[in-house]
Amino acid sequence: MKIDLQTAAARLREMDDILLLTHRNPDGDAAGSLWALYRLLTKLGKRVKFQLVGKVPENLLFAAECEAEDFEEKFIVAVDLAEATLLGEALQPVYGEKIDLNIDHHGSNTFFAKETFLDAKAAAAAQLVYSLYEEMNVPIDVRSAEQLYIGLSTDTGCFRYGNTNSEALHTAAELVGIGIDNGDINRRIFETKSKAYIQFEALAMSNLRMHFDGKCAVMALTKDMFTRTGLDESETHMIAGLPRQVEGVLVGATIKEKDNGLCRVSLRSNEPVDVSAIAKTFGGGGHKLAAGCDLYGTVSKATADLLKEIEAALHSYNLL
Amino acid sequence: MKIDLQTAAARLREMDDILLLTHRNPDGDAAGSLWALYRLLTKLGKRVKFQLVGKVPENLLFAAECEAEDFEEKFIVAVDLAEATLLGEALQPVYGEKIDLNIDHHGSNTFFAKETFLDAKAAAAAQLVYSLYEEMNVPIDVRSAEQLYIGLSTDTGCFRYGNTNSEALHTAAELVGIGIDNGDINRRIFETKSKAYIQFEALAMSNLRMHFDGKCAVMALTKDMFTRTGLDESETHMIAGLPRQVEGVLVGATIKEKDNGLCRVSLRSNEPVDVSAIAKTFGGGGHKLAAGCDLYGTVSKATADLLKEIEAALHSYNLL
């Protein structure tokens, strides 16, 4: 059931002994929102713990919360979780059907939780957690502000993407006003590239292939490239945006070769193309201009399968 | 003489037949602020014209104002102009000492104008022009909002740099609230790279050299690289930020080879290094974390000269 901000705040007030969850391989919005929610609930005197599945990007750890003592949870709250499968293989069977409240901003949310506080217009889950701080009258200290800012800036590409609405910028202004060092945080998240990353990016750029009259750019990220550069996979989130940056490109894709014949695809588009629809045909999802899905097979088979759908999408918009 | 917002607004109200100027090779803040000021004064019923020296980056032209009819100016107003020499060789002798009002945000401003409305804490000159709209009660239409947003986003690196204060984000929130398509503008300015640019960047990255224990990164941009890729010089503003992005780098520099033995240097730093001091030793200037200067001689001589000053600066901070 979909609930509003006031009801979500009331539910949180009633809860205690809470387990917080988010999607596997947490990005800045998942981790930042979860940490800020942990802090909010802790400040309200509640016993809270959380589980993060997969590695949190190292450049976010400066704002991490320490995991608290263990206890048996009475309530489970998720944040930034579009569907239960994204909990990951280990947690989905255990918690997938037990989530009491989900706080999310994905239009593709499947309403798998008992109650969902969803605002698909919000630029980030962090925006919703921020609104909970306001609604529940909990002061935002510098650490909470950093966590919320991490979420907001990550999901908006540091206020670049089209989802950066007036509310997101207004919230960012408030968070910066609280005294966070946003220049420093931005450099950590968006401007610092390891030498391995720089080598990896150069290899990736040499793998960039144009299709359909330059309207589509695809970049293969092979296991060999990770081995050669030593790049950690958690450092590749910025790569996904590169193909779309080429002038004239409407759909940009990266295809990351994983183990066991799995290819993880990130899709980015420029208006008017809705890549979440393309991702959905492969069982994935996301937002209009940024989505993802998994394909099985070799990189070249995955590329061929993907290009067929991209071509169909471009045709459907009369762009080919 | 330094004047405040209210006085600057009063002066503008008194003026008519105004010529607007800004620095040569206008970037987004110079052009955006000038256009928005042109629009502000035009809306107040004044006769206004402007001169832009050098090419405005093509991706900003969607928000350009058309140059108006010619007339003999009675007043000269400059915006985003730190010193008179930046008018360029052609305009400085004519207008350098005749500027009635300068609206600027550079801490290095030399107060060459008769009156200067300076706020060195403002993230962009566009922030000051925005405050003039507010002070003078002139409604900001979508086109003006686009122009102000161009200025604000350009000078803050789309809200990434350390100069992005709460006021800048608040103003951006207001401008986005007026109805501009900020996602589209950001893609035009920050996310769209021509094929020539992509080739140029790859060449530039291969020219990246590390110095002083990885604390300094220098990138040479030679005339040959421009010839080979066909990149227009006005497209290189994003390149200047690359050397600083390497993990551990405190001072990043690009050295652009120009005609007649001139090298144009862009400096970027991370805290605590003040690169405007380094630029000043070569007769240049700018901000603490972003500055520039001209050096004469071959690229390798300019590099050697520059490295000496960077080494001295790193020593002065006890960083070597």
Image: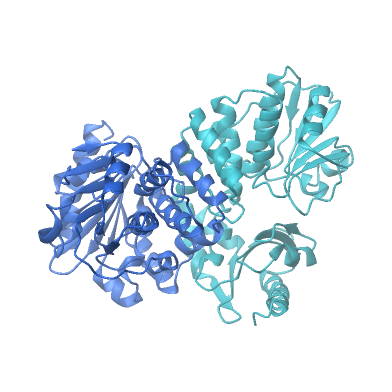
Chain colours: A blue, B cyan
**For this rendering, which residue is in front, B170 or A43?**
A43
> Residue B196, image x and y in percent?
47, 52
Q: On the picture, is A190 further left or further right than B311?
A: left
Q: For the C terminus of chain A, give its image quadrant.
A: top left
Q: What residue sits 21% from the left and 32% below the top?
A: A316
Q: Residue at x 33, y 71 (%)?
A: A232
Can residue A120 be seen? no
Residue lying farthest to the left in this orientation: A93
Where residue B152 sits in the image (x, y, percent)? 59, 42
Give x and y (percent) for residue A6. 33, 37
Q: Is A5 in front, or is B85? A: A5
**Where residue B101 sits in the image (x, y, percent)?**
82, 36
Count of numbered tags: 0
Can you name the residue that lies furthest to the top here?
Answer: B45
Residue at the image point whose x is 39% and y is 69% from the top:
A58
- The answer to whether B306 appears left or right of A41 in the picture is right
Which quadrant is the N terminus of chain A positioned in? top left
Left or right, A147 with respect to B39, comes to: left
Please say whether residue B205 is visible from this viewpoint: yes
- Left or right: residue A211 versus residue A205 is left
Residue A222, quarter of picture: bottom left
Q: Is residue A162 above or below residue B163?
A: above
